[in-house]
Image: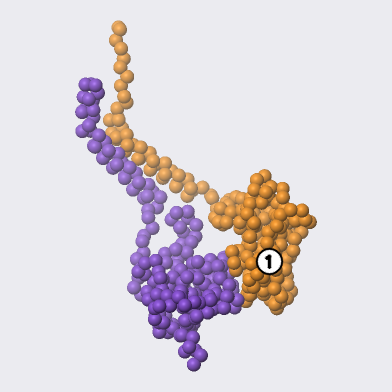
Amino acid sequence: MAESGGRLRRLGPRAPRQHLTLAGSAAGAVALAVLVAGGFDPLEKPEADVAPLAAGEAVDLGPFTVTVDRMRVVDELPGISEGDDDTRVLALVATVTATGTTTQYGAMLSESVALEQLPGVAGDGDGPVPADDVYVMADGTRLDAVQPGLEYEVALVWEQDARADVPSDARLVLVGRTLRESSIDRSMEWLDPLPVVAGVLEVTAPAEEES
Amino acid sequence: MGGRRVARPPSSRLTGLPRQAAFAVLLVAALATGRAVETLMPVGDEVAAPFERTGGVGDRIEARWGDVEVTSVAGSTRIEDPYGATHVTGGVYVVVDWTYTAAGEPQVPAWVAIRDTEGRVFRTSLERNPYSSGGAAQPGIPRRVAAAIEVPADAVAGAELVITLEPNPENHRRDDVAVVDLGLTQDDADAWAASEEPLEVAEPADGPGAMS
């Protein structure tokens, strides 16, 4: 016991130094490994030069070309939303095409068109709120895949709490992406979402259209 | 005489580096070597390309993971999916019925797409381009499945149906892919682009009668 205690006393002061050496070596190994592997991709910060939104003008978002047409409030969208006393639907009508040679999925499209914070429209955080879903105007079915070479007239929709006022306008943000090699698996992917176009669009209520 | 040798631990002072640092250097050297080899080796797309097992409509195509046989091809601007919803396209819906028989173990052909003569790839999805594998098919039991994919009319002539297991195309490398020439012409494209007759997309089914 006495010998054991003596060894422990002798080893005790050395242990923190060894841990430091080990940690330093590990950190150095990681840093060198990252450098050897090509380093981290440079992080591009969002640029301030976001172009103004213009209805009827095609915007290249990378995987998609989106032409915003109009925005309206709908109590009922046949096949899409029945509407009720608690919610109403804000629908952005737009034309969409896929730019590449392969299918792009609807989730990326709905993430590419966002509303700035609007009372009654729930989002995950403080930033713009992506569309809840995308529907094909011709048949009211959900657009979960955008095929190359086809043009779709779509409704991008957000649900709004009916207790909030009907907006007279809304600020839209269109988010672009860049096709580049993924740092993780080196596959080509649409990455680096950044706002490319933003602007205010008038929101039309059904009653106004009828009058 | 009678002296005992005492084993002495090898001194790390010989290398001038602590053991941990030496390990780190070796690790980095191994990574650098791997990267250099990867860069220098002629690993091109051709080497990693999948093995395409080709055939036509009615042919039984054998792949590593099972057999595929396209039994019919039709087209229209409208389909009715298995849930009763009608889909309308500005192009053409190509509806393909085919039979799949797993080999060896239960398998799910998760990647189904139409490839046109320009190399464009049109994949199935859950709703807009309905296709359901019906889950893993038991080996030896034929399963009838259907896929409906919307394409522009100019993609119809010469189109092929491409089927394989892995849903991620990055994982198709060096694996078997069944490629079926659907035998379609511009006349088919024109006729289908003008058709408003809804085509029914069948649900998957197992059992006798699945294989012709």
| Side of A99 where B9 appears, left or right | left
Given the current orientation, which residue lies at the most extreme bottom position? A211
Total numbered badges shown on the rendered structure: 1
Return the residue nearer the eye: B26 or A182: A182
Q: Which residue is mark 1?
A: B201
Residue A113 visible in the picture? no
Residue found farthest to the front: A85
Q: Residue at x 44, y 47 (%)?
A: B35
Q: Is residue B109 visible?
A: yes
The residue under the point 23% across, 28% down is: A8
**Position of A128 relative to B10 (above/below):** below
Q: How is the image coloured?
A: by chain
Helix, strand, or loop for circle 1? loop
> Quadrant of residue B117 in the image?
bottom right
Q: Residue at x 37, y 76 (%)?
A: A119
Residue B207 lies left or right of residue A10; in this view the side is right
Q: Badge 1: few (under 14), some or many (20 or more) residues near its Cα, within 10 Å?
A: many
The residue sitting at 68% across, 68% down in the picture is B94
Colour given to chain A in the rendered image: purple
> Is B176 left, or right, of A159 in this rendering?
right
The chain identifier of the residue carrying mark 1 reads: B
Q: Which chain is orange?
A: B
Toward which corner of the image does residue B14 lie, by quadrant?
A: top left
The location of residue B28, given as percent across then percent down, is 38, 43
In the displayed image of the protein, which residue is found farthest to the top? B1
The location of residue A140, given as percent across then percent down, is 58, 75
